[in-house]
Image (cartoon, helix red, strand yellow):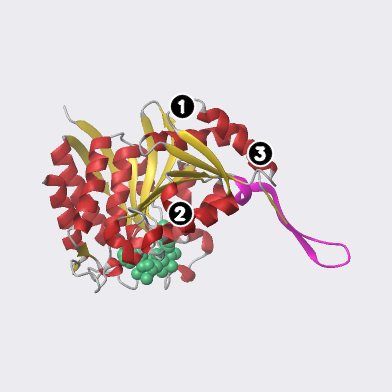
Amino acid sequence: MSKQYKIAALAGDGIGPEVMREAVKVLRAVEKKHGLSLEITEAPVGWAGIDAAGKALPDATLELCRRSDAVLFGSVGLPDRDPTIPKEERPERAALLRLRKEFGLFANLRPVVLSKALAHACPLQPERQGDGIDILVVRELTGGMYFGRPKTIEDLEGGGKRAIDSMVYTTAEIERIAHVGFRAARLRRKKLTSIDKANVLENGVLWRDVVTRVGKEYPDVQLEHMFVDNGAMQLVLKPTQFDVMLCENMFGDILSDEAAALAGSLGMLPSASLGQTTGEKTFGVYEPAGGTAPDIAGKNLANPIAQIASAGLMLQYSFGETAAATAVQDAIAKTIAAGLRTGDIFSSQDAKARKVGTSEMGDAIAAAIGA
Ligand code: NAD
C-alpha cells in the first residue's frame, strides 16, 4: 500500500494561487513516480480567507491544518488592503503568526541554493561562488531577544527613556533546535557551523555548551563554532565553506536574509517552519521566503521554484520521503540547467537562457520528475 499523507494547501493572495498550482502539479508527478498517496486539500487564507469567511485564518482552514500532516502555504497580505484593517487582523499576523503559535513552530529552515547556471544572479563575483552555493540556515524561531522578558521602554528620572530587550534561552530550547540542525546536517554534507557570540553574551556561552554536548550524539557530523560577526563576513567572503548554519533567533533572522541575497531572487527561496517531532511525525508549515508580489500577480510572471522547493522540503522534513524530496531538488536543478528562466532570474547575457512563464516552469519541473 502506498504511504498516505494529508496536506493542507493554503495558497493565499497575490502570486500565491499561481505558484501553488505549480507546486501541486509537481507533487502530483512525485506522487505517481514515487508511489505516494497525497491528499491535498485547498483552503482560503489571508485576504482570500477574509473575503470567504471574514477572517485571515478562517476556523475551517485552521481545522483543516489540525487534521493535516503538513501545511503548504503560499503567501498572504496585500499592501493596498492591509492598512484598511486593524494590525492584529492583518493577514501576516492573523494567519501566519497565528499558525506558528498554534503549532509551536520553533525551527525555521531556509535553504539557499545557487547553481553555477545562475551565477549572474548572485551579487558575489563568480570566483567566490565556487561550484555553487548550498547552505541551510536553521534558525530558532520562538526564543531569544524577540520574545524575552522584560521588554519595555521606561521613562528615566530627569528625562529621557530606557529601552530594554532581554535575550533569554533555556537549555531545553537550545537542545531542541540543535537536534533539528544536526539531523538536517545528516541529510546533507554533514557539517554544522554553530553561530553565537560567546565572547560577549552569556547566552552565547550557554548556546555553545549545549550545542557541543548535543553534537556528541552526532559524531558523524563535523561541528564548528563561529562568532556571528565573523559568520556574517564569511558568508560573503567564502560562502561555499558552509553547509548548515545553526543560529538563535535574531542572528538567524539577519544571517538568513544575508544568505538569501546570495541566491539572487526571492523567487528561488523556500522555507520550512517545524514544530516538535512526535514519534515519526514532524508537523511543519512550508512556504516561499518572499511575499505576495502584487506587482507581478496574475500575469504568469512569478517564479514558482520557491513554492515547489517548499513542497520538496515538506516531503523531506515532515514525511521523511528522502527519495521524493531529492527528486524535486534534482528536477529544479535540471530545469535550470536546461536554460528555463522566469523573468526574475533571466539574463540576456546567457545564450542558453529561455524566458518562460510560471506555468511553463512548473510543467518543465513536473516533467523532469516523471522523466
Ligand atoms: P514581496 O516578496 O512580495 O516582493 C518583493 C519583490 O520580489 C517584488 O518585486 C516581487 O515581484 C519579487 N518577488 C517575490 N516573489 C517572487 C517570485 N516568486 N517570483 C518573482 N519575483 C518575486 O515583498 P513586498 O512587496 O514587500 O510585500 C508584498 C506583500 O506580501 C505585502 O502585503 C507583505 O505584507 C506580504 N508578505 C507576505 C509574506 C508571507 O506571506 N510570508 C512575506 C513577505 C511579505
Q: Which residue is mark 2?
A: 238
What distance separates the C-alpha of mark 2 from that of mark 3?
Answer: 26 Å
Residue annotated with mark 3? 205
Residue 189 location, x and y as percent?
A: 37, 39
Amino acid type at circle 2 is Lys
The magenta span reads 144-163
Q: Are marks 1 and 3 in contact (CB under 8 Å)?
A: no
- The residue wearing badge 1 is 219
Instruction: Mark 2 or mark 3: name the one nearer the start of the chain.
Output: 3
**Residue 152 on the magenta segment:** yes
Residue placed at 36% from the left, 43% from the top?
65
Q: In the displayed orientation, state which residue is furthest to the right.
A: 158
Decide whether residue 213 is among the magenta residues. Answer: no
Q: Amino acid at mark 3?
A: Val
Q: Is mark 3 within 8 Å of ligand 1?
A: no
Q: Residues within 10 Å of mark 1 (few under 14, many from 20)?
A: few
- Chain-order first, disc 2 or disc 1: 1
